[in-house]
Every structure is written in structure tokens, then in C-alpha cells.
Amino acid sequence: MRRTMVAIAIGYVSLSAVACPSAREPVATAPVAVPSVAAGGAPTAAAAIRELCPPPADGTAGSAGPSARPSPGTVPPEIAEVEDQVEQVRGLTYVHPVAVTAVDDDEMRRRVESSFDESYPAEAYDRRTSAWRTIGVIPADADLREALRSFLGGQVVGFYDTDTGELVYEGSDDLGVTERLVLAHELTHALDDQRFDLSRLDRLGRRCHDEASEAALGVVEGNAQFVSAQTIARFSSGDLGDVLGALLQGLGDQPDLAGVPPFVQALETWPYTAGLGFVTRLELGGGTAAVDAALRHPPTTTEQVIHPERYPDDLPSPVDVPDLSGALGEGWGDLDAMEVGEEWLDAMLRLRLDGSSADESSAGWDGGVYRAWSDGTEVAVAMDTAWDSEEDARAFAHAMEEWNGEGDGPASVRADGDHVRLAFSTSDDVQRRLDAALSSA
């Protein structure tokens, strides 16, 4: 899962807000029961991530499976014009024509929905829903999978599918400024895919390398944001006000979506906003060649995207959460596990602290992972985070103490040198057992 258990993007979905539908009604969700688990757990957090990662839908390891590629057919002149403009801005040419399909709102929703069940396996997301509720990053009644369904259903106005090479966008051949912005964004994906094989980055998400997958999305989406904005700015013949309005929307003026927790919104829009800053920094420092290099060798952590000066050399320190299921009691087993990067922790802190405090407290990140266990009723979550220095660790620990003080569920913070270990539970009794297990681990 890309920060969830599978690649959150369908191909590379454009979440640009340009011409997006208004916010949908709040998601009506039935209570998500804590999934049943097998007793016992994997020896390490990394092993738990591998064992809990859902297999690809076609049953092959790390492959999207064979997909029929639609014929490009005759490219309408208006779209061919945008392709030519993208080539000029990007400094590269297409290897072959792109299959482009214009659809209406109903067809866009149908296409997104038809891919949803395969891309978001219910059991995996029920597990993550239980873990995230226990941590407190989503409300106690939130359903992560349905929140993502609502987000995609209300936001997707175009996508490029790396499996099929097809570009689908909401609009018509009569292109206005917003349609051109969406097309330029997705045509950038198509061009980058033809030149650098973006499908290899999809495999990161399919293998549940959440942090590396999100970091790679930062450069992919950031470049599409950069190129589409440059394309509209250089070539649009529309009214200046329309151009500026489209650019402001496309560059991150996202409407809130009812029913989608703020934490989920923050994670899903991050590759587009932080990624744009990362690519802009690359362009200013090294031009197109620097962006090409980043697509060949993408950043491996969200830290590298947030702080471009740390790319590519600043690598995280090892972290682990051992199996504590036996200490928690009979019938406890692995529920969920995932890598936790600077972006995830920053978005978490921002739920209860101001933005500057969150940024400062997460900026010294040097590694992170959490692991959750359950007995089918209660849930316990332990997180290990590493920091660049003991001072950075203390700053994060202090922020988490304040963060926990604003919450409702049992939680604890332990600073140990340059590591900070967090624990969250669904009851005081489980919290006591978890704290004791962590103290003796």
C-alpha cells in the first residue's frame, strides 16, 4: 500500500482540482469491525509488512498483469497541439502516439469505480482503518477505504494508466484552459512513462514499500504539475484571469471534501504540492537533466522530497518493532504494519498542532515504522522512530506528548537517545500490557 497497502493512484491519477466536481456528500459508512487475525506474529516489522501485503490481483508477484493497450487512433488536432507544447516545455519527444479518450463525468466515475475494488482490497484497508483509528489520525467512526473512494470519486478529472498507456480525461475536444491544464498534466505522465518506464514505480506500492512509493510519486506528480503549469503559462491564448484561476486550482487550491478525514486529504494531495517544490528546485539547479535523473533514480523517502538538499544521499537509519503479540495475551496477532516517513508524521502532528510546530518537530526524521496487533476486539500499535540527533528526538517527543494530550485514547511516548517510541491502544488495560512489553523488549 502506498501509505496504504496498494498503489493509491490508478495508473497515475491526476488529483488536480481543475474543473473537479464539487465536494460529494459525506460518506455513509457502516461500522468497520476489527478484522480477525492469526495468533502470533512475524519476527520483525519488515517481515510483518511483507506477510500482510496483499498479493497483486492477478496473483503474480509485483506485476500489474497483462493489459490490452488501446490503439492511439487519430489524435485530434487540439490534443496534438497540447502534446507539442508539452514536448517543448519538457524538452523531450514522445516515442509513440498516446491513446487519449475524453469522457463525461458519469463515465469518469464509472472507470474510477471499476478499478477501485482491485486497487483497494477490503480486508487490507479494514486492517489499516483499525490501526489508524487507534493511533488517532482518523476519527473513531472513519472508514479509510470509503474515505479514499469518496476522495477519488470527487477529485479525479483525468488519469494516465501506465499499464495500458491510455490517457483518460473529463472534457471534450473543445479545449478550454482547464481542459488543457489537465491534458498537459497527464500528457507529461505519458511522456515520462515512455521515456523512463513509470510502471516500475507502481511496483513499489504493490509491494507495500509505502515510504519509497510516496517519495517516487512526489517526483512523478511534481513534474507533471511543473510542466502543465509552464505549458499553460507559455501557450494559453485565453483570458489572463482564466489562466491564473486554472493555475491556482491546479497548483493546490484544493476544496475540502466532506466525509474525507483531513489526514487522508493531506496524504493524498502531498505528492502534488511538495512534489512541485521538489521538481522546481531540481529545475532551477540542474534543468531538465536533473529532473530526468530523479525519474531514473527517484527519491526513496519523503524527507528527500521535502528537503531537496538531502536528495539523494541522506538515507534513513534502521528501525524495527519486534513481535509483542505473545506479551499482549492469548490470541493476539499481526494486524497491520507500515513504514512511516517525515510526511506521514508531519501530517499527523498537524491534526492537533500548528503547522510550524509540526514542521519543526518532524524535520529531524531519520526513519520510522509502526506495527499493530489485535485479538479481534482490541488493538495495540507500537511505533519506532529514529532522529538525526538526540535534540531532534526530544523535540519530536515533546510534540507527541502535547499531541497525545489532545487525544482521547490511551497512548505513551518514550525517548531513548535518538529514537522515540510511541504506543497507542484501544483500552487502558491493553496500554499497560503494551507499555510493559515495550519496556522489556
Image: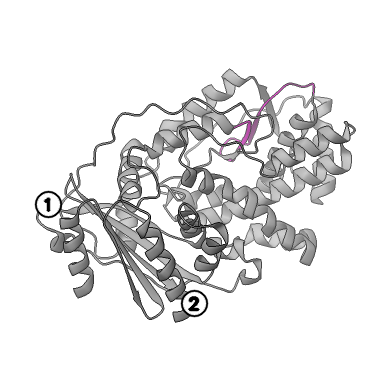
Q: Is residue 125 left or right of residue 190?
A: left
Span shown in magenta = 156-174
**Residue 305 pos. (x, y %):** 61, 61
Q: Secondary structure at mark 2?
A: loop
Residue 398 visible at all? yes
User: Around disc 2, counting alpha carbons within 10 Å, would you say few (fewer than 14), some (14 to 19), or many (20 or more)?
Assistant: some
Q: Is residue 172 magenta?
A: yes
User: Around disc 1, counting alpha carbons within 10 Å, would you say few (fewer than 14), some (14 to 19), or many (20 or more)?
Assistant: some
The image's colour scheme reads one colour
Q: Is residue 53 left or right of residue 16?
A: left
Q: Is residue 439 left or right of residue 13?
A: left
Residue 268's disc number: none
**Residue 44 pos. (x, y %):** 28, 65
> Which amino acid lies under the numbered mark 2 shown in the image of this protein?
Asp
Q: Is residue 290 left or right of residue 269?
A: right
Camera-nearest residue between 373 and 122: 373
Q: Identify the residue shown where x is 82% and y is 36%.
A: 243
- Above/below status of 353 relative to 7: below
Q: Is residue 76 magenta?
A: no
- Above/below status of 45 relative to 39: below
**Residue 170 pos. (x, y %):** 66, 25
- Say which residue label 1 marks: 331
- Sequence order check: which comes first, mark 2 or mark 1? 1
> Which amino acid lies under the numbered mark 1 shown in the image of this protein?
Gly
- Say which residue label 2 marks: 388
Give the position of the C terminus as an image quadrant. bottom left
Camera-nearest residue between 247 and 406: 406
Q: CA distance from mark 2 to mark 1?
A: 37 Å
Q: Identify the residue shown where x is 19% and y is 53%.
A: 333
